[in-house]
Image: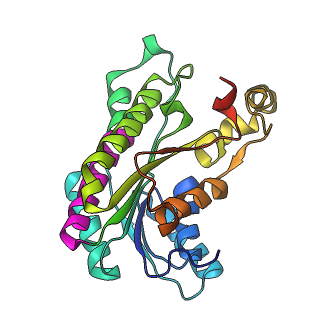
Amino acid sequence: MPDLLVGKNAIVTGAASGIGQAIALAFLREGAKVLGADRNATGLAETAKQADERHAGSTFVSHTCDVTKRTDVEAMVARAVAELGQLDVMAAIAGVALEHDFVDIEDADWRHVIDVNLHGVYLCDQAAARQMVKQGAGGRIINMSSVNGLMGEEELAAYNTSKGGVTLLTKSAAIDLAKHEITVNCLAPGYIRTPLNAEGIADEEWINEYLKRVPFRRVGEAEEVADCAVFLASDLSRYVTGHPLVVDGGQIAVI
């Protein structure tokens, strides 16, 4: 079904690369106007270039933003409203991952992962929700969790914790915002082909061993996650809220 998001205005954080970029482009494909936000201005320029090449005539606004700073996030929402019109969809996708054995985690690394992955999502969700409540027309909020928000994995304690927090933040916000007709859901991808995972995918021995955990026996593609984001952003999901949508090729089904 084409044009699922015609008439919708969306913010996508983490839009400079990976899943965030794929979601921004998928939203444009489906007719939405998109403000793509990221700290990486060069990456945003590449997303804008791809938007022009793939979806001529679409509206993509690049905005540099640090999602860990409330002032940046509020300015991002304000710009989206000023340039696009009312805010209909917030996709809080920006994230980081750092690998450490638990006993070796430094406080600064722990705080960085939690700050971006969890606190940043909270700031984006709250700023978007306040705008959506003010508008009085409902809305869609989509967060980036992970299968790691539903299970643990070695050497990723900070990441696992942040994503588990996002999953419960999603459920909690969904309860509070239902009275405003605002749905809040999260994506829970498995191992996806992104710059964040490039090193692991390049290690043929390691990735082949890892994929034994995945019934599909392959790495997921960012576009496959983006298509699920389109569903959550559209009216097809109007009665879905508080839900972690797992996109993992069956990985956690066998755990």
Magenta span = 117-136
The stretch drawn in magenta includes residue 253:
no
Q: Main secondary structure of the magenta part?
A: helix
User: Could one spot residue 73 in this view of the protein?
Assistant: no
Q: Quadrant of residue 88?
A: bottom left
Q: Quadrant of the N terminus?
A: bottom right
Left or right side of 137 for 205: right
- Residue 94 position within the rendered picture, expressed as x and y whole percent measured from the top left: 44, 50
User: Could one spot residue 190 in this view of the protein?
Assistant: yes
Residue at point 35%, 80% (across, down): 84
- Residue 90 position within the rendered picture, expressed as x and y whole percent measured from the top left: 38, 61
Q: Is residue 41 above or below residue 51?
A: above
Residue at point 58%, 81% (across, down): 52
State how the image is colored. Answer: rainbow
- Residue 42 position within the rendered picture, expressed as x and y whole percent measured from the top left: 49, 64
Q: Quadrant of residue 19?
A: bottom right
